[in-house]
């Protein structure tokens, strides 16, 4: 069956508009797929949207959070509303969760980051981090928005490299 070019172009415009106007700067892949007509190839549509956004200096990142895929809109460079200390806290939390334990215990995090807990609270308030309860255990997770924020600043984040910064 041939794909109607008008339906295809309208879908590309609708999804692009939704991505650009979404207040949280991220959207679930499932929600985007539901906007596509069954005759359309979602991967082809998202590839075209990605290319169009790239032309105007924006980037679309795919991230997984709680077993769901998200698309996160980012731009080049760092966000000036985030302090270096907040970036640092987020980087350490992401590195710890990647390399030590994906489920960072909230109480452990409060102890580790007690000196900068206000920064962690800021990150929680702005959905860069999220508190979750799994089997009566409160954990701290980096959201797709938090991962995207760090991508622009520290592309290859490793705990070992972060710890080496403090040895000097």
Image (cartoon, grey):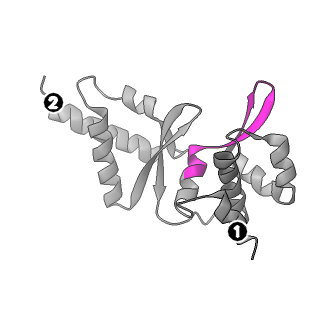
Q: Residue at x 75, y 70 (%)?
A: 166
Residue 31 within the segment the image draws in magenta:
no
Q: Of the residues under marks 1 and 2, which one precedes in the sequence?
A: 2
Q: Please give left or right for residue 21 compared with residue 45 in the image.
A: right
Which residue has dot 2 on it?
4
Task: State the image quarter where residue 83 is shown.
Answer: bottom right
State the residue in front, 118 or 43. 43
Q: Please give left or right for residue 117 compared with residue 19 in the image.
A: right
Classified by dominant secondary structure, the portion drawn in magenta counts as: strand
Q: Which residue is drawn at 80% across and 30% down?
A: 137
Tell me which segment is drawn in magenta. Answer: 130-147
Q: Which residue is drawn at 59% across and 32% down?
A: 66
Which residue has dot 1 on it?
164
Where residue 17 appears, as percent x and y from the top left, is 38, 43
State the residue in front, 40 or 140. 140
Which corner quadrant holds the C terminus? bottom right
């Amino acid at each position: 069956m041939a794909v109607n070019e008008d339906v295809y172009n309208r879908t590309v415009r609708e999804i692009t508009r939704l991505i650009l106007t979404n207040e949280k700067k991220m959207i679930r892949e499932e929600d985007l797929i539901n906007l596509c007509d069954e005759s359309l190839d979602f991967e082809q549509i998202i590839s075209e949207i990605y290319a169009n956004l790239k032309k105007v200096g924006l980037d679309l990142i795919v991230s997984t959070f709680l077993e769901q895929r998200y698309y996160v809109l980012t731009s080049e460079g760092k966000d000036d509303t985030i302090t270096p200390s907040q970036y640092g806290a987020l980087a350490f939390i992401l590195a710890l969760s990647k390399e030590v334990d994906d489920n960072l215990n909230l109480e452990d995090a409060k102890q580790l980051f007690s000196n900068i807990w206000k920064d962690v609270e800021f990150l929680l308030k702005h959905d860069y981090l999220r508190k979750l309860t799994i089997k009566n255990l409160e954990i701290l997770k980096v959201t797709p928005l938090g991962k995207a924020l760090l991508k622009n600043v520290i592309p290859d984040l490793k705990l070992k490299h972060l710890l080496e910064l403090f040895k000097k």
